[in-house]
Image: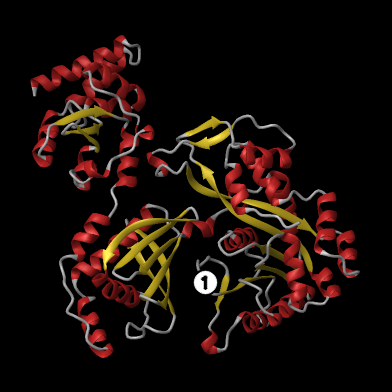
Amino acid sequence: MSEDRFARKRLGEVLVQAKLLTPEDLARALELQRSDPRKLGDILIQEGMVSPENLAMTLSLHLNVPFIDLKRHTVQADALRLIPEEVARKHKLIPLDIIDGTLSVVMCDPADFQVVEALAARSGMPVRPMVGIESDIEATIDLHYTTSVEIAERITEFAPAPVIEGVEEERITAEVVAEAPIVRSVDLMLEQAVKDHASDIHLEPEEDSLRVRYRIDGILHHGLTLPKSAHAPLISRIKILAGMNIGERRRPQDGQFADTIKGEEVFFRVSTSDTAWGEMAVLRVLDRSIALLELSELGFQPTPLDTYRRMLQSPFGMILASGPTGSGKTTTLYASVNLLNREVQNVMTIEDPIEYNIRGINQIQVNRLAGIDFATGLRASLRLDPDVILVGEIRDSETAETATNAALTGHLVLSSVHSNDAVGALFRLLDLGVEPPLLVSAVISVVGQRLVRRVCTRCRALAAPPPEEQFAYEKETGEVASQLHYGEGCAFCAQTGYRGRTGVYEVLVLSEEIRRLLLRGAGASEVKAQALKEGMIPMRRDGMMKVKEGITTPYEVLRNVYTIG
């Protein structure tokens, strides 16, 4: 105890000598420590006397141990398996690597020799302590401690009996699915998805195994591979949670459920379908924070954002969000109705399904078994005195016609359409049978959009772009790009160089000239040329403007935003 106090006092003296701490602050911190169980380093940081970075660097010099910047190092799986997550969290440390039979561990407090000895006893090898920044260590723990090992261990705790016939299979699975290992395994997969900010969980049966993948920032990542014996009970457990029929394995099914994960209620939408090797399931993770986003948080440039907000103030007409599946259309529509959600207005939605419940908005769920689709739901809502109507998607002639008529009879209608760009949405409505005079009278604006990955802010650095990316950037901006921002890959972005996503947009306003072009049967290229002449910023240029700001890369823009003609 006295040695620990002596070391702490010397640490304070080193900080004072390095002019990182004043003698008065050191005296105050030592006084606090007499009646405070916190370590001196924690007191100095939490009282704002020393920054975490300066404390870590000083500890490195003081104790003659290496300082490790975890943003620049990759945690090795072999090392990770030697120290349980609960130990890592309790003592604020992360096993980094095994070098020449020695376990390297990055710690907040590498002078805690009792912990070092305990790690050596647990791992069965010598431990080399290193020092790191506390916030970096905690973030790395969150990133690298996956549930894969624990799920695999849980799966091995049971061994389902051989399947004989279809009826017997249902009976056996219903018994197995109630077992604790299966319940815990599903819970762990859900927790992992939320921790990794995944949008989807894929359970994909293969010939002799079950593959689990997570979609993160629009890209599928391998999660774990489980034995084929885990397939039926895991799928059945998920179907029970989602209120689906566990005995029906041939027909596609849909369901949803809520679960509490780390104190927060998270909603999951489940879809299943039979494949060559058995039933596949995909779980959509519904992030409630998306429903609360403001338009300014989505990635609009200032001028298009002002234009779009002005269009939303129109008392009637139709505003469309266009793009392929997964381009963020629903997020844009929710942010739009949030802006319009006022006490003086009746805002109604028709959705399939209702992904987020929004206070103050009247939401109708599509239910085809009850005869409620987008068209019938829209007609029903028109009898309920709405001011604003959100139609989840226009996908058929009846919905297109009903939505157009609603926009022409004093309602503001918001909806989404699958198309390549903003101009394409107009021609999609024409293809669905909306007459040109009705189209130009109803539609006031269209937003075309895509989602691109953000460059990781932790490892972002300037680098020379490849020739094809440089050419694409210069073509859109007219500027020479000798260096652009790229992510080098670090622990926080799982070595991808990207973390999070943002939108790229184009906002088309139907001017009188564009309306005249549509009425005389002009083609999409002619309409787009006029829109560009009037100042519309196309999606690809909007994306390259974000490249210039260091938000994304030319590769991401080229990968997600394609042009025709």
- Report if residue 441 is visible in the image: yes
* Observer-nearest of 233 and 475: 475
Q: Is residue 481 left or right of residue 314?
A: left
- Tell me the colour scheme of the image: secondary structure
Query: Which image quarter holds the N terminus?
Result: top left
User: Does 32 appear above or below 248?
Assistant: above
For image coordinates 48% across by 53% down, the residue present is 217
Residue 224: x, y in percent?
31, 58
- Location of residue 277 by image quarter: bottom left
* Observer-nearest of 489 and 287: 489
* Observer-nearest of 10 and 511: 511
For image coordinates 11% across by 41% down, the residue present is 122
Query: Which image quarter holds the C terminus?
Result: bottom right
Residue 434: x, y in percent?
78, 77
Residue 352: x, y in percent?
54, 75
User: Does 153 appear above or below 116?
Assistant: below
For image coordinates 32% across by 82% down, the residue present is 246
Question: Which residue appears farthest toward the top when viewing the image?
Answer: 17
Q: Is residue 388 left or right of residue 294?
A: right
Residue 356: x, y in percent?
50, 66
Q: Is residue 411 left or right of residue 222?
A: right
Q: How many marks?
A: 1
Say what amino acid the circle numbered 1 marks: Ile
User: Does 322 appear above or below 97?
Assistant: below
Where does label 1 land, which residue?
A: 354
Label 1: how many Cα within 10 Å (few below 14, some 14–19, many 20+): some
Q: Secondary structure at mark 1?
A: loop
- Report if residue 48 is visible in the image: no
Q: Is residue 166 left or right of residue 375?
A: left
